[in-house]
Amino acid sequence: MNLRIFQRTILVLAMSQGASCGGASSDVSRARAGDRNLTNANLTNANLTSANLTNANLTDANLTNANLTGANLTNANLTNANLTNASLTDADLTGANLTGANLTDAILRDAQFQNADLTNARLNAAHLTGATLRGANLRGTNLRGADIAGADLTDAHLPSADLTNVTLRGANLTHADLHGANLDGANLPDANFTGANLTSANFANANFANANVSGADFTGAMGLGGANLSLVVCDTSTRWPAGITPPTCR
C-alpha cells in the first residue's frame, strides 16, 4: 500500500470513529434532555442516574454498562434492549415493556417491576435482591443463576421460566404461577410459596428448607424426591405429586 492510500485509510477510520462517538454522545444528551424517542439509541456506558425516562421508547437501544440508578422508566418500552451489566438499583420500571430484553449480569437491587412485561427476557446472573416484581410477566424468562433473595414476586407469572440454580432465599412468591418452570438446583430457604401454582415444575436438587408451601399445588411436579424438604411449612391444602410421600407439615 502506498503512503497516500494509507493516509486516506487512517483518515476514514478516524472519521468513522468520531462519528460513532459523536452519535453516542448525542444520544446520551437526548436522553438526559428528556427525549422520549430513543429507538436504537447508543447509550453504552451512559450515566443516566435519576433520569426521567417515563414512557420513553428505548426499543433495541444499547444500554450496556449504563448507570440508571434511581432512574424513572415507568411504562417505558425496552423491547429487545441490551442492558447487559447495566446498573438499575432503585430504578422504577413499573409497567415497563422489557420483552426480549437482555439484562444479563444487570444490577437490579430494590428495583420496581410491578406489572412489567419481561416475557422471554434474559436475566441470567442478574442481581435482583429486594426487587419488587408483583404481578410481573416473566413467562419463558431466563433467570439462570440470578440472585432474587428477598424479592417480592407476589402474583408474578413465571410459566416455563428457567430458574436453574437461582437464589430465592426469603422471597415472596405468594400465588405466583410457576407451572412448567425449571428450578433445578434452586436455593429456596425461607421462601413463601403460599397458594403458588407449581404444577409440572422441575425441582431436582432444590433446597426448600423452612420454605412455606401452604396451599401450593405441586401436581405433576418433578424432582421432589431429590429435593431438600426439611422443616418445610405446609398444610392439608398443599397438593403433592403422585408417588411422593408428603413431608411432615409444621
Image (cartoon, rainbow, N blue to C red):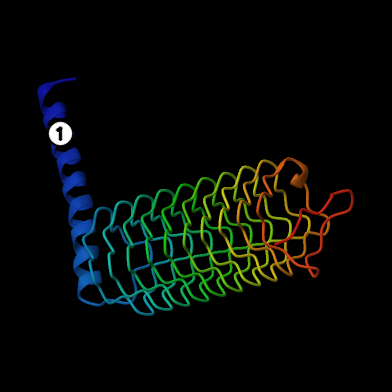
Give the residue displayed 54% in from the left and 49% down from the top. 166
| Quadrant of the drawing holding the C terminus | bottom right
* Residue 27, image x, y percentages: 24, 64
Q: Split into 4 quadrants, where in the image is the N terminus?
A: top left
Instruction: Give coordinates of residue 110: x percent, y percent.
Output: 37, 66
Q: Is residue 54 above or below residue 187?
A: below
The residue drawn where x is 48% and y is 57% is 148
**Depth check: 23 or 134 in front?**
134
Q: Residue 8 sits in which quadrant?
A: top left
Where disc 1 sits, the SS reads helix
Badge 1 amino acid: Ile
Where does residue 134 sit, x and y in percent of width and height? 53, 74
Q: Is 45 on the left or on the right of 37, as rendered? A: left
x 16%, y 48%: residue: 18
Q: Which of 221 and 18 is in front in this view?
A: 221
165 sits left or right of 65 in the view: right
The reply, left or right, for residue 170 in relation to residue 15 is: right
Residue 196, compared with residue 231, is above or below; it is below
Q: Is residue 56 above or below residue 228?
A: below
- The reply, left or right, for residue 197 in relation to residue 169 is right
Residue matched to label 1: 10
Q: How many labels does the image show?
A: 1
Identify which residue, 224 or 85, lies in the foreground: 224
